[in-house]
Structure formats: C-alpha cells, structure tokens
Image (cartoon, grey):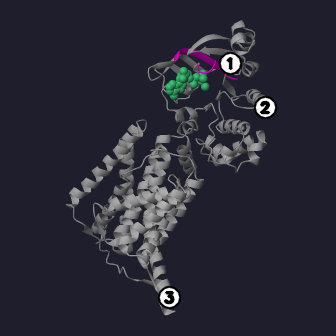
Amino acid sequence: MSSTILKVENLETYYGKVAALKGISLEVRQGQVVTLLGSNGAGKSTALRTISGLISPAAGKVFFCGEDITNLPAHEIVKRGLIHLPEGRHIFKDLTVSENLELGAYTLKDKHERRRRMHDVFGRFPILQKRRHQLGGTLSGGEQQMLAIGRGLMAAPKLLLMDEPSMGIAPLIVRDITNIVRQLNEEGTTILLVEQNANMALGLAGYGYVLDTGSIVLQGEGARLRHDEKVVRAYLGG
Amino acid sequence: MVFALSKWEVLLQQGVNGLILGSFYALVALGYSMVYGIIKLLNFAHGDIYMTGAFVCLSVFGVLSGVLPGWAGIACSIVAAMIFSAVLGWLAQRFAYRPLLGAPRLSLLITAIGVSLVIYNTVMAITNSQPLFFTSGLDNAAGIKIGGITVTYIQLILLSVAACVMIGLTLFIGSTRTGKAMRAIALDQDTCRLMGINVNKVIGLTFLLGSALAALAGGLACVYYGNVQYNMGYTIGIKAFTAAVIGGIGSIPGAMLGGLLLGLLEAVGTQLLDSSWKDVFAFGLLILILILRPNGLLGKSEIERM
Ligand SMILES: Nc1ncnc2c1ncn2[C@@H]1O[C@H](COP(=O)(O)OP(=O)(O)O)[C@@H](O)[C@H]1O
Ligand SMILES: [Mg+2]
C-alpha cells in the first residue's frame, strides 16, 4: 500500500459560533484520486479551505507528507506542494492568461523552470497558448477552468485539492475536465476532488467520503459508494 | 503680433510650472492609489509622509552641508528622506493598519486619520510651528533659455527625476514578479495566498514604495521651494488624492495622468484668471470630469463604496 500524503484528524472549523466542520477525519494516499461528496452547504469547501490554510481550525490536525501543517499560513503550505484550486475558479480577471499562469509558479524563483512549466501547460491546453495575451476575465467558463488547472500545475503539485471543477460548466466540457483529471492522476498527481456531481467524481475516484452538515457520514471504495443505496438516492438521482 | 507671441510664451512658461506642480501631485498620488488599490484604504497619513520627507531632507542636508555640498548633498539627503519615510510608512502599516484589515472599513479610515495627526503634531512640536528654510548654496535661477521661456536646472532635474521614477514604476508594476503580485492582490487576496504569495509582505512593500515616492516629492519640494513646514502635507495631500480619483483610483497610470492634469489646470487657471481663482478653475473642471466619468479617466467601471 502506498504512503499517506494527506491525513486529516478530527478537524473542526467555525464561522463565528457556527460549526461548519464538526470533527472530520480523512486520508489520501500517494497516487490516489479521493473524492469528498456532499450537497450544497455540507462543508466541502470549508474542509479544503482549512486544509490549505485559508482558515484556521478550532481543533484537529492536518498532516501533509508527515509534517504537521495545521497552523502554517497558506503561502507556506503552497511551498510544500499542496495546491488548492478554489471553487469558482478565481481567475485574476484583469491579468492576462500568461500572468495568471506565472503567478501559479510564484514560489518558484528559477526562471527557466517557470518557462518550461508554462510550455507544458500550453502543450496540455493549446487554447491557453492561443489566448495567452488576453485578460483572464474574457475567457469562457470552460477555458477559465483550464486556466485554473493550468495555474495549479505551474506549482508542480504533489497534491491537488480541486473544489467542484465541474461547477457552472457545460456538460460537454465537464467530460473534458473529467478526462483532464484522470490524465493528471495517471501521470502521478494525487488528487482530492470535491464535487456535488457524484456521477463524475465516483467515475474517477478510488475512494470517497460523503460529508453532510459538517460530518462524514459515509466512506468507502468508489465502486462501492456508486452502488450504495443512500448515495444513489441522495446524490445520483436514483 | 508681438503681443500674441509673448502671450504664447507666457502660457508655455506656465505649462512648465504646471508640469512641475503636476509632478509633485503625481508622485504623491501614486502612493494614495497603490495603497487604495491593494487594501481599499484612503491613507490620510500620506500627505504627512510627504511632509516628513521634506523635513528629513532638510535636516540631513544641514548635517551634510559641510561635507557634501551642492547636488551630491541634495541627492544624499533626498535618499535619506526616502528611506526614513519608507520605514515610517511601513511601520504605520505594520502596527496600525494591518491589525485592522479585517475590521470595518471605517475603523481603518479613522486609524489613518490618527496616524496623520500623530505625525503632524510631532513635527509641529519639534519645529515649534515655525517654518524652516533650505539654502542649498546653488543658484536657483540658473537655467537654459528655450525660445522665450526659461527652464531652470532644478526644474529640469525635477522633471527628469519624476519622469524616470514614473517609467520605472510602470515597468516594475507591469512586468516584475512582485508587481504582478501587487496587481493580483488588488483583485483577490485569498487566491493570492493560494498562489504562495505572502500577502502581508507585499502589502508592506506597497507602503514602502508609496511612502518613498511621497518622500521623494517632499525632498524635491524642499529643495525647489526652499522651505518646509509641518502643515505642508495637508494641501498637497488633498490635491494628490483628488488627482488619484480623477485618474481612477487604484490605477497607476491614472495617478500620473491625474497629477499632471491637475498641475497643468492650476497653472493655466493662474494664467487665464488669477492665482486666487486657480483652484476654482481647476476643481470646477475636475468636477465636470467626474460627472462625465465617475470612475475617473482610467478607472474601472465597478462601483466602489466607501
Ligand atoms: N464565509 C462564511 N461565513 C459564514 N458562514 C459560511 C461561510 N462560508 C460558508 N459558510 C457556511 O458554512 C457551511 C458550509 O459551507 P461550505 O463549506 O461552503 O459548503 P459546501 O462547499 O459543501 O457547499 C454552510 O452552512 C455555509 O453557509
Ligand atoms: Mg463549496
């Protein structure tokens, strides 16, 4: 069995006095795609934001590659190779496509390596190369998602946290995004995928967790979850 | 015919004066605009940072005058003023503004007013409310004649320094890694943190830079006008802030354009009417510009509320 890259233990996060995470634990191993499912408001984004250091938890621990990163600031966590692609893409709208990508490799000082990575991203997403001088805000939703993924790849992630990459994207493009995620994983990137689109996520993930109002209510192999009665009823429209 | 020509010459001469004044406004407006762009704060203390720059320049020159007279001494004094004010601006940011970044916008604004009053009153107390005079020992009237107008050496130096700084800043913001981070932070701070940007550090750097530019203007003003007073930051603070808004607050080229435009309008107003009417003329036109373009000349069309 491969080594654990991310370990979350009893994480609790509050907004003011309201608990958004009530002590969740999960684990991602090297080379896996793990999905975190749940309906709107379940706490999925909060979980990712806590892991990546955007919000501090009230209790619990986060370990990345064996290191306790619970109280590190977000920009320090990025340096270790844990990259979070936020919900809604968050492209820098007034910056060009190239500038967006360059910021993805902000922590990398080596200019040549930055250029090499941008070349890789352009190879993967030729549309971004074509639009490299355009402002990020002028791209379509699908293109922006590619830019968001490309920007994440500029950091050469060890672990990629993806928050609803299929959100607000045309069904045809969702298939493209699914293929991209699969390909990234085949190339060796470990992924924690947050989705409401359980169909998409369970097609990709080897293991899954189901989050409901801040607690993990179910977990198991992807194939098993896909046939779980409760999951089918709640998330697969069965 | 002769009359018409000389009238053009006077207007040109006023144009030079306007550019000088406008350069001062622009250098100060840049700091207002950069700080507003990145943390949406109207930094009321910015005019006082300018005043501090003038004050430090004068003091350091006084100490240096035996050792380093003339332009070398002036240059060193201005650099010292920039360093001092940059540190002062950074300290205000670090200890007064940063703790309040999550607080209501109004608390931050009041804090800035507080910082302004602290600096203002400190210098007032130190100087006993008296103006201090700057004598460089150089001939301020020396210069070159172009056609019928005279441009003094000090005016030439002032304009070149301002032009170089503005070009340098444009390149810095436009193409360096840190410049890109500054623009990105103005758009979306949390996402910047996810890029690995130390947002607080970059905000601090913005204050360093903006304050150094204000002190550069203050030092140049000290040399150019020959006197320094604790309240000299007040009017230029308001005018530079106006310039930043006219240009489109948050926009770097906008601050430069707004500053130069305001300086030129005042100079032309002085010429066409009378110096006591220059503000009425300039600000009347500026109100008109804002009615036509509420977000300023180069500002974005989003509506921002204070
Ligand atoms: N910034 C915030 N301030 C207060 N409450 C929030 C904030 N963000 C999310 N919440 C609340 O926390 C809960 C979990 O939200 P979120 O993590 O965004 O869920 P999900 O991503 O699963 O849709 C929701 O009840 C939401 O209303
Ligand atoms: Mg969410």
Q: Which residue is mark 3?
A: B4
- Amino acid under disc 2: Asp
Query: Do marks 1 and 2 share a subunit?
Result: yes
Which quadrant of the picture is home to ligand 1? Answer: top right
| Residue to which mark 2 is pinned | A176
* Percent position of residue B240, x then y: 42, 60
> Chain under label 1?
A
- Which residue is most to the bottom? B2
Disc 3 and disc 2 in contact, CB within 8 angstroms: no
Q: Which residue reaches farthest left?
A: B128
The circle on residue A68 is none
Residue A232 quadrant: top right
Label 3 to label 2: alpha-carbon separation? 72 Å
Can residue B230 be seen at all in this image of the molecule? yes
Using the image as rendered, state which of residue B205 and residue B12 is in the foreground: B12
Q: Nearer the viewer, mark 3 or mark 2?
A: 3
Of the 4 image quadrants, the one containing the C terminus of chain B is top left
Q: Amino acid at mark 1?
A: Ser
Residue type at mark 3 is Ala
Give yes or no for contact between labels 1 and 2 (Cβ–Cβ under 8 Å): no
Pointer 1 residue? A2
- Asked whether mark 3 and ligand 1 are closer than 8 Å, the reply comes as no
Instruction: Give SS at disc 3.
Output: helix
**Residues in magenta?**
A21-41
Secondary structure under the numbered disc 1 in the rendered image: loop
Q: Main secondary structure of the magenta part?
A: strand
Q: Position of residue B66 (x, y in %)?
A: 28, 72
A29 magenta-colored: yes
